[in-house]
Image: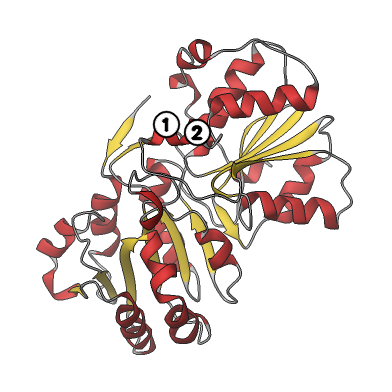
Amino acid sequence: MNYEEKPYSKAFIDFAKDKPEVLCISADLTGSCEIDKFRDQYPDRFFSMGMAEQNMISVCGGLALEGFKPFIHTFAVFLYRRAIDQIICSIAYSNRNVRLMGFLPGLTTPGGITHQAIEDIAVFRSIPNMTVLETGDATEVETVLETADSINGPVYVRVLRGNVIRLFNTPFKFNQIRKLSSGEDIAIISSGITTEEAMKAVKVLNDFGIKITSLHVSTLKPFNKKQLLEELKNIRSGIITVENHTIIGGLGSIVSEIIAEENINLPLIRLGLKDTFAHGASLKYLMNEYQINTMAIVKACEKLLDISTNIDNEDIDNVEINDMTVNSNPEDL
């Protein structure tokens, strides 16, 4: 599988170079958020606010009022836990065009509870006027900037950093769900880093004749209810949601709200953190510990279908998805 090194770094420079109204804002994490090269190339449009997130948010609200487009860069957890009042009062209430680029979402950091943004989607989707986006691969990291810039009002984006896997060869499209596979047995709905795990699960389960509709969600608020309902029409045995987030208030909650409102009679299994904090460890370890990996998805499918596949970790480790780079066209749904 192809990986891209620091896709955000180049993408932000390419996106902003001819847009003088775009400002790059840092909260003392310039290198960690991959904007150091932008700082070096465009120092007049770069502002380091230090470890003062509350002040940074209020300043950016003022900059947006004057016609600038500030893109704030920091770890996701420091945005909403430290500055929620300023986000609501200085940005969301007045519907300002401020972009909140949140790095290290969920369990993608070994830093423990102080650095793991595990309830950010729940918080941000509850704020009026706020749009919530999540990147799932290098292509989405590279193309989410244009999408965020096109939205009127504040936008929160979960951004992947470092070496990021490339799953898709079509760009991020606002409020469009990617359909990755079709099948009538089970619907797997994933977001962010869990989509790679879902793709592996689909491939290994296909060998057992299990047919799965796999959907990747990158716009969490608003949510394309119409598309989801269309895809659930022919599902026979159940729905699985999997997310790098607590199951409270995130993707699992969104889907459960929709199927309850629409009286859809299908069992739902929500994979994610189950009302718990995580701890510091490698991403692979944490995804296994908190059951958001391929094996967890396989076990959920077995439960819904009341079968045993005897798939083990070795089977999963041998799954190759090099041939599964998805030329997904959201309009095909």
Label drawn at residue 285: 1
Residue 103 in view: yes
Place residue 199 in its image quadrant.
top right
- Residue 17: x and y, percent? 22, 64
The answer to which of 261 and 140 lies nearer the viewer is 261
Dot 1, how many residues are within 10 Å of its Cα: few (below 14), some (14-19), or many (20+)?
some
Residue at point 59%, 16% (across, down): 204
Q: Is residue 288 above or below residue 151?
A: above
Residue at point 12%, 70% (across, down): 43
- Residue 67: x and y, percent? 35, 85
Label drawn at residue 133: none
Place residue 248 in its image quadrant.
bottom right
Residue at point 57%, 31% (across, down): 198
- Residue 171: x and y, percent? 46, 46
Q: Are marks 1 and 2 in contact (CB under 8 Å)?
A: yes
Could you tell me the amino acid type at mark 2? Glu
Q: Is residue 59 above or below residue 258?
A: below
Residue 185 in view: no
Could you tell me the amino acid type at mark 1? Tyr
Dot 2, how many residues are within 10 Å of its Cα: few (below 14), some (14-19), or many (20+)?
some
Q: Secondary structure at mark 1?
A: helix
Q: Is residue 27 left or right of residue 225?
A: left
**Quadrant (top left, top right, bottom left, bottom right) of the C terminus:** top right
**Quadrant (top left, top right, bottom left, bottom right) of the N terminus:** top left
Provide the residue designation for mark 2: 289
- The Cα–Cα distance between marks 1 and 2, rounded to whole angstroms, is 6 Å
- Residue 239: x and y, percent? 74, 37
